[in-house]
């Protein structure tokens, strides 16, 4: 059925183009243009059409490659070899003579009118070539700088350095084995690189690192830098020229420059190499002005370097949204690495947070695994929960800083009162009321000044709470409990007890599924990142309602406050100080 459809579309398209005055010619399989194109193309093609088009300026010949699944896949338009040789380079024309007509990911071909769609595509291609020849679209070069820069690159190296706005020295290290297919890495810190490599079981090897110079510069056309002499055309800033002069004067065998410029909210990062200079007469080896040095080797070609970016800025920028968290370099303490704490840590790491302090006193047991981030592999060696979570996080994002404490949080705070002070936010996911109350008490006694978040889920997936306690204003953790010790905003009716006791064992646990935890964690991460961005002036409770219907259907009662609520909503409420609160109500008598 599909083959009939595809060949019919092909027929209609050809007829349409001919009707509209296009001089179309089917290429033979052994046509040299076809052979040239099929060598480079990954998409299998049904036909190739040769098309002579007369533009405003001149006649050009295009080759249309029609994919097997046209019109569901775009045709590609190439410039004939003759025209390519005459006009390359121009913007949007790659070294395989492909004219980049539009981004296939954002455009949908109009399959109701395939002929018209292809005609439009041809018109775009012609316009691109003509404005390229007329040098009208040179600015487009910069838009796609890296695509052009990387076209003829021989050297590609991995990069974990986040571009910044000042000149500095960087180091290029050789790896003990290839990762991502490359064996050199660029970094601004050897220690960070070693940390980064650990989870990948790769080390630094070889001779000394190559010292490279990093330059934040102004944007330039990607074809403007080809020889030694071109260097002075792209840098104007005196400080930068001085830095380069110094760097070259250090008499090194390898002169590698790394540069970046800012474009559309992103740093464009790339590099190149100059060959070593021979002795220059009349100058001491390390006192050669840059101009003199470059004029000696004028036409010596530079060697372009492409950087495979694995740095935080690049990796997280692609995901959008959370870029502010990445820039702020936020650190978070997670107290409790059980079900909630483990998933939340991973979720926050995915949002771009790369500094954690984890505290938990337990080891991972097989029965933890259905509701935990980690599984049997970690449980089988009785791994500490903090170590298991750290392992998962650093394997997912090498270089993530995880300070772990396998201990009771209160014992830790007794020994080191200031241990949490370096963190921007402390998240308490212990599911233990008395410990949570003690932490709340310490906050209210100004032991630490970071934001404090209490997180917990309610039984049977009925919902969860995120309680933000402002160190100065509003109520505290205790303020949200009544005098009988029940949580005032509980979603379930607190007259019922849900704690289950494992047979023959002393531990109790709340019944809820992993699905509830993971659903709640998504909400909690979103709330957490918004709090990190902008925290409210007063203590606030975020209540996430889970599957209320299911909960009632299974015979349980809701707190009447939530009777009229719909499931899967978030309710935000300010928590006020209560007079009877033991912690903040009568501070003086308890101090
Ligand atoms: Zn209080």
Image (tube, rainbow, N blue to C red):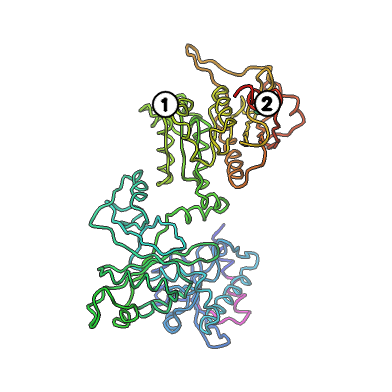
| Near-viewer residue (27 or 493) | 493
Q: Position of residue 133 (x, y in %)?
A: 51, 83
Res. 174 image quadrant: bottom left
| Secondary element type, mark 2 | loop
143 is within the stretch colored magenta: no
Q: Which region of the structure is painted magenta?
A: 11-26
Q: Specify the farthest residue to the top.
A: 504
Position above or below: 355 against 156:
above
Identify the mark nearer the N-term, 1 or 2.
1
Q: Is ligand 1 closer than 8 angstroms to the Cβ of mark 1? A: no
Residue plotted at (40% across, 59% down): 308
Mark 2: C-beta under 8 Å from nearest atom of ligand 1: yes
Circle on res. 466: none
Mark 1 or 2: the one toward you? 2
The residue lying at 40 percent from left, 47 percent from top is 399
Q: Is residue 19 magenta?
A: yes
Residue 92 picture location, percent across and down: 50, 73
Please name the residue that numbered disc 1 is placed on: 363
Residue 468 vs residue 495, the one in the foreground: 468
Q: Position of residue 49 (x, y in %)?
A: 50, 75
Q: Nearer the viewer, residue 427 or 364?
A: 427
In the rendered image, the residue lying farthest to the bottom is: 57
> Neighbour class for label 2 at 10 Å: few (<14), some, many (≥20)?
some
Q: Which residue is mark 2?
A: 585
Q: Is the residue marked by circle 1 packed among few (<14), some (14-19), or many (20+) residues within 10 Å?
A: some
């Amino acid at each position: 059925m599909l083959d009939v459809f595809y060949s019919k579309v092909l027929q209609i398209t050809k007829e349409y183009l001919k009707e509209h005055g296009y001089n179309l010619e089917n290429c033979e399989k052994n046509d040299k243009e076809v052979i040239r194109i099929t060598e480079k193309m990954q998409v299998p093609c049904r036909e190739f059409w040769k098309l002579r088009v007369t533009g405003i300026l001149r006649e050009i010949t295009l080759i249309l490659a029609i994919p097997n699944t046209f019109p569901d896949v775009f045709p590609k338009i190439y410039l004939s070899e003759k025209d390519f040789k005459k006009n390359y380079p121009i913007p949007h024309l790659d070294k395989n003579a492909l004219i980049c007509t539009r981004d296939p990911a954002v455009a949908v071909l109009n399959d109701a009118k395939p002929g018209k769609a292809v005609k439009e595509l041809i018109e775009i291609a012609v316009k691109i070539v003509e404005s390229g020849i007329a040098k009208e679209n040179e600015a487009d070069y910069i838009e796609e700088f890296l695509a052009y820069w990387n076209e003829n690159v021989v050297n590609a190296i991995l990069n974990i350095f986040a571009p910044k706005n000042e000149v500095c020295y960087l180091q290029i290290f050789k790896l003990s084995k290839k990762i991502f297919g490359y064996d050199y890495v660029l970094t601004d810190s050897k220690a960070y690189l070693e940390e980064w490599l650990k989870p990948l079981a790769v080390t630094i090897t070889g001779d000394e690192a190559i010292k490279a110079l990093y330059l934040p510069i102004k944007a330039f056309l990607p074809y403007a830098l080809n020889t030694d002499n071109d260097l002075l055309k792209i840098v104007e800033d005196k400080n930068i020229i001085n830095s380069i002069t110094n760097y070259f004067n250090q008499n090194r065998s390898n002169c590698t420059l790394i540069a970046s410029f800012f474009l559309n909210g992103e740093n464009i990062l790339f590099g190149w190499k100059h060959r070593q200079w021979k002795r220059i007469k009349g100058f001491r080896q390390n006192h050669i002005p840059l101009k003199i040095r470059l004029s000696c080797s004028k036409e010596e070609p530079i060697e372009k370097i492409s950087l495979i970016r694995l740095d935080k800025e690049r990796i997280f920028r692609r995901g959008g949204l959370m870029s502010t968290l990445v820039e702020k370099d936020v650190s978070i303490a997670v107290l409790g690495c059980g079900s909630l704490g483990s998933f939340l840590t991973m979720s926050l790491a995915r949002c771009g947070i790369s500094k954690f302090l984890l505290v938990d006193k337990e080891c991972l047991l097989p029965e933890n695994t259905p509701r935990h981030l980690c599984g049997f592999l970690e449980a089988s060696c009785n791994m500490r929960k903090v170590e298991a979570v750290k392992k998962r996080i650093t394997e997912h994002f090498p270089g993530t800083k995880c300070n772990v404490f396998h201990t009771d949080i209160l014992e830790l705070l007794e020994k080191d009162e200031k241990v949490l002070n370096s963190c921007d936010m402390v998240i308490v996911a212990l599911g233990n009321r008395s410990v949570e109350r003690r932490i709340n008490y310490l906050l209210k006694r100004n032991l630490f000044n970071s934001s404090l978040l209490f997180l917990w889920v309610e039984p049977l997936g009925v919902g969860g709470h995120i309680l933000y306690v402002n160190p100065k204003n509003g109520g505290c953790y205790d303020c949200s409990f009544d005098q009988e010790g029940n949580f005032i905003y509980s979603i379930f009716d607190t007259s019922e007890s849900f704690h289950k006791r494992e047979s023959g064992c002393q531990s109790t646990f709340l019944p809820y599924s992993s699905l509830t935890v993971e659903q709640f964690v998504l909400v909690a991460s979103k709330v957490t990142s918004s709090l990190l961005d902008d925290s409210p002036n007063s203590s606030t409770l975020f209540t996430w309602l889970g599957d209320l219907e299911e909960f009632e259907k299974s015979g349980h009662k809701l707190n009447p406050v939530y009777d009229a609520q719909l499931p899967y909503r978030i309710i935000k409420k300010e928590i006020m100080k209560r007079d009877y609160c033991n912690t903040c109500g009568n501070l003086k008598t308890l101090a």
